[in-house]
Image (cartoon, rainbow, N blue to C red):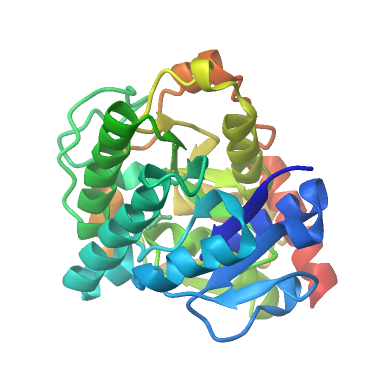
Amino acid sequence: MPSKILVIGAAGQIGTELTLKLRDLYGTDQVIATDIKERSPEALLNGPFEKLDILDKPRLYEVVKQHGIKEIYLLAALLSATAEKNPSLGWDLNMNGLSNVLDLSRDGHIQRVFWPSSIAVFGPNTPKNSTPQRTVMEPTTVYGITKVAGESWCEYYNNRYGIDIRSVRFPGIIGHKSAPGGGTTDYAVHIFHEAIKTGHYECFLSKDAELPMMYMPDAIKSILQIMDAPSESISLRTSYNISGVSFTPEILSKAIQKSMPEFTISYKPDYRDSIAKSWPSSLNDELAKKDWGWNPDFNLEAIVNDMLVNLKLAV
Ligand code: SER
């Protein structure tokens, strides 16, 4: 019998799909979905759900003890664009949420933690192409600052208390089952919905803002792969670079036009464009490949085809 799992931030873009996948693999009742939202999203009604504010430490401890949780996937965070609007909440939620989960592990209640970092750990002084695993970081967003600090905090807890925490630096994630919220990379999901709904998309990034991206099944696969790997093979306890595909809004719009020639795009860059331009265009992920066998499946064409097919079916 696998140990019980807690997903925190289960109603979010990655949380929803990860919870469904973990329930498929380990059994519906083994995976407790939690979120700050009062009610479970419809997609997760098949299993247990608890309302949980990650900043409420006593309640977190209570939920973990009540369900006999041994493994946590911590996905609750304020993403880059939202955190810029409320920097102190971004710091509080992202740092203290992580601290609360790491303390649970330090205190012997849980055995393993997954926590995602992000391409936002990098900044304008970072090499832009094939960004190395170890390089200049210097992020300029509060989200990126919390992710860099969080990576070091994870490594510190691993060194000091032996906590088994694993992490990857996610690029922008594209999926059709759940909506993204508050990210700079969200355009790459909105564009598909608007293409189908109205045939036009006004993009909040400029046409040449090239960013690393990944299809949701690959993102879920990376989580399962790193969590399945033997502890000795995880040589890095900050966070691994992982890469999928890289493209600009213009390249993505042209790929959509191959299936929908009538689709049009216009550009009205806002503050998110300067965030995007401070991030890498592509990442070097050799260490993830070597340590735990990372290998993405989806290229741009496959992502576009799958998104359009699924969203059209859903209309
Ligand atoms: N998708 C995230 C964001 O745009 C990056 O990790 O904030």
Horizontally, residue 47 falls left or right of residue 272, namely right
| Foreground of the two, 53 or 11 | 53
Q: Nearer the viewer, residue 150 or 99?
A: 99
Q: Quadrant of residue 156?
A: top left
The quadrant of the picture occupied by the N terminus is top right
Report which quarter residue 253 is drawn in.
bottom right
Res 192 seen here? yes
* Relative vertical location of residue 49 with respect to residue 135 in this rendering, above or below: below
Q: Quadrant of ligand 1?
A: bottom left
Residue at the (53%, 22%) spot, across then down: 231
Image point (37%, 60%), residue name = 184
Q: Indicate whether 195 appears above or below 2.
A: below
* Residue furthest out toward the top: 290
Q: Position of residue 21 (x, y in %)?
A: 74, 52
Of the pair 278 and 31, the residue shown nearer to us: 31
- Check the image and report above or below for 172 versus 76: above
Q: Residue visible at 78% across and 48% down?
A: 26
Residue 179 seen: no
* 150 displayed left or right of 290: left
Front-lying residue, 158 or 80: 158
> Residue 71 location in percent, x, y?
57, 47
Horizontal side, residue 135 vs residue 190: left or right: left
Instruction: State the image coordinates of residue 196 (x, y, percent, origin top left).
Output: 69, 73
Q: State the quadrant of the C terminus.
A: bottom right
- 103 relative position to 312: left or right: left
Image coordinates of residue 153 in percent, x first then y, are 26, 41
At 24% from the left and 28% from the top, the residue drawn is: 127
User: Which residue occupies the extreme right position in the image?
Assistant: 313
